[in-house]
Each structure stands twice: as C-alpha cells, then as structure tokens.
C-alpha cells in the first residue's frame, strides 16, 4: 500500500516542485513504484516530467470533477520512470467546481483509493496556497513533506502551515502527520542558514531531514529538458542530494513499519 505524501508550503519558490520531480526519480532509482500528482495549475511538475501541459487530453482536473477515469489521465515520465497525473491551467477552475460538489475535500482521496496498492509512494505537488486543492492533498495524504529555505521569514510562515495542517488533520484526516522538513537551496556559508537550521532542529527534532538540498544550478536547468537532475547530470550535487533524501525516506519508512509490527 502506497505511502502518500503531500509536498506542501504555502510559500512559492521554496523547491516543492523540484523536490517532487527529483525525489520521485530518486525513489524510482531505488526500485520503488512511484506516482507523482501535479496539483498546481502552473503545471511545472508536468513540464519538468517531460509532459507537455498544453497538449493534455485529460488532466487531474477532469479526474477531480469526475469527468474522466484514472487510466485516461495517467501519463508516464520517460526520463523520470514514474507515473504522473498531470495538470495545467484548467485546474484553476477546480476551486469553484469543487465548492459545488459533495465531499469536496476528499475528491482526491477517493480518486486514489483504487490504485494505492499499485505504488510504494505517491507524491503530491501542492500549489503555493492553502486552498481547496491543498486541502484535497492533505486529506489524501498520510504525511506532509515541507520544503523550506533557511530564511528568517520562513519560520514565521512555517508556524502558519503547521497550524493549518493540524486543523485540517483534526477535522478531516486524523492520521495526517508531518513527515519531514526539508532544507532546500541550502548554503552553509550563510550564518543565518545555520541559525535557522539550529532552530528547526530544536523545534522539530527528528522530523528535520539530515539530507539537505544545496543550491545547485543543475536542479534549476534540468526541468527545461523535462528531466530530473539524476538523468540530466547524475554526478551533480543536486542529484546526489535527492538520492540521499530518498534513502533517508525509505529508511524511515522501514523503521516505522518495524515499530508498528513489533
Ligand atoms: N536546490 C536548488 N538549487 C537551485 N535552484 C533551485 C533549487 N530548488 C529549486 N530551484 C529553482 O528555484 C525555483 C523555484 O523552485 P520550485 O521547485 O519551482 O519551487 P515551488 O514549487 O515551491 O514554487 C525554480 O526555478 C527552481 O528551478
Ligand atoms: Mg511548484
């Protein structure tokens, strides 16, 4: 049964999409079966996976409003080796369309139920806001992975996000966990980075991933070729960092499964 992780942060530009694409490809490299869901109308995860968002017959939007089935929307990322439920601007209409629907918060969860057993990991790329799409992701997920830059204001935004996750969890998805915090675009030469890092460790303890993602130009270049960094330049520091993250994620899952059966 797949573990479903929402990659969320209401701030834009913190590395959500980069994390989705590169973590998905890295999990595939460790022989896991992965589905990536693009839940952002910008469609960046779709394009970065090598699928043209402009030419979609069906997208996650059609699936959410019940206008197509899973197999019609499903795509395969050749370079990434994972499956993809793509998105484009059509998804901006979802907010309004969902409001009129029953069970509007759990449309994604219901849509995924029949295929959860086909994957080891399902990653959801959230939009940069706490809207109905993000709520759908949080209701469908077992855990939230929060990518963030180690800036002063990041901490402020983080407490809003954590409160929202707790509120939505309490109301709609009691099993929802914060799976982990990921430091992105990390530069240890900046002293503020180290201060913020220390504060994150103090507040979140083991939830803070040991793996950190450095600022690396290969990670920024790869999506324009529709590739993860692992394929674009597998020696790059960015590619190696995401492989390390995938390893850490898998080890944590294994440890959690062991405690659950012990
Ligand atoms: N570790 C990194 N090093 C260099 N550039 C990065 C890194 N992570 C993300 N970027 C770039 O920063 C921008 C924002 O990243 P993105 O993943 O799209 O963030 P989000 O999905 O949170 O808006 C993109 O242009 C991306 O290529
Ligand atoms: Mg994004």
Image (cartoon, helix red, strand yellow):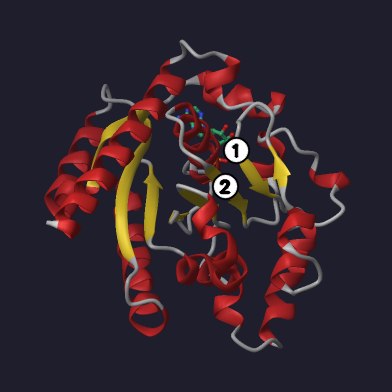
Marks 2/1 in contact by CB < 8 Å: the verdict is yes
Q: Counting residues from the N terminus, which is met first, the one under dot 2 or under dot 1?
A: 2
Q: Which residue is mark 2?
A: 35
| 229, above or below 248, in the image | above
Q: Which residue is nearer to you in this view: 116 or 165?
A: 116
User: The N terminus is located in which quarter?
Assistant: bottom left
Question: Label 2, label 1: how many angstroms apart (C-alpha)?
Answer: 6 Å
Crowding around mark 1 (Cα neighbors within 10 Å: few <14, some 14 to 19, many 20+) is many
Q: Residue at x 32, y 41 (%)?
A: 249
- Indicate left or right for 253 with 230 as reference: left
Is residue 223 depicted above or below 138 in this figure?
Answer: above
Report crowding for label 2: few under 14, some 14 to 19, many 20 or more residues within 10 A (C-alpha). Answer: many
In this view, 99 is above or below 210: below
Left or right? Give the position of 83 relative to 134: right
Residue at screen point 51% across, 41% down: 33
Residue 82, labelled with which disc? 1
SS at mark 2 in the image: strand
* Residue 150 visible in the shown view: no
């Amino acid at each position: 049964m797949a573990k479903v992780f929402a990659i969320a942060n209401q701030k834009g530009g913190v590395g959500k999409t980069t994390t989705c694409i590169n973590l998905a490809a890295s999990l595939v490299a460790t022989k896991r079966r992965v589905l990536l869901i693009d839940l952002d109308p910008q469609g960046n995860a779709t394009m970065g996976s090598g699928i043209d968002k402009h030419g979609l017959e069906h997208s996650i939007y059609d699936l959410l409003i019940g206008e197509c089935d899973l197999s019609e929307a499903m795509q395969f990322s050749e370079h990434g080796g994972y499956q993809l439920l793509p998105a484009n601007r059509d998804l901006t209409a979802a907010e309004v369309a969902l409001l009129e629907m029953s069970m509007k918060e759990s449309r994604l969860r219901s849509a995924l139920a029949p295929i959860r057993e086909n994957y080891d990991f399902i990653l959801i790329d959230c939009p940069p806001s706490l809207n109905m799409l993000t709520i759908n992701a949080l209701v469908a997920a077992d855990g939230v992975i929060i990518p963030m830059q180690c800036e002063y204001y990041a901490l402020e935004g983080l407490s809003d996000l954590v409160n929202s996750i707790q509120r939505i969890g309490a109301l709609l998805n009691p099993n929802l966990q914060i799976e982990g915090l990921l430091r992105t675009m990390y530069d240890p030469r900046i002293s503020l980075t180290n201060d913020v890092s220390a504060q994150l460790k103090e507040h979140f303890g083991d939830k803070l991933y040991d793996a950190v993602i450095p600022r690396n130009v290969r990670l920024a270049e790869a999506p324009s070729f529709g590739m993860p960094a692992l394929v674009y330049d597998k020696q790059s520091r960015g590619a190696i960092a995401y492989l390390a993250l995938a390893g850490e994620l898998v080890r944590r899952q294994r440890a959690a499964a062991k405690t659950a059966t012990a």
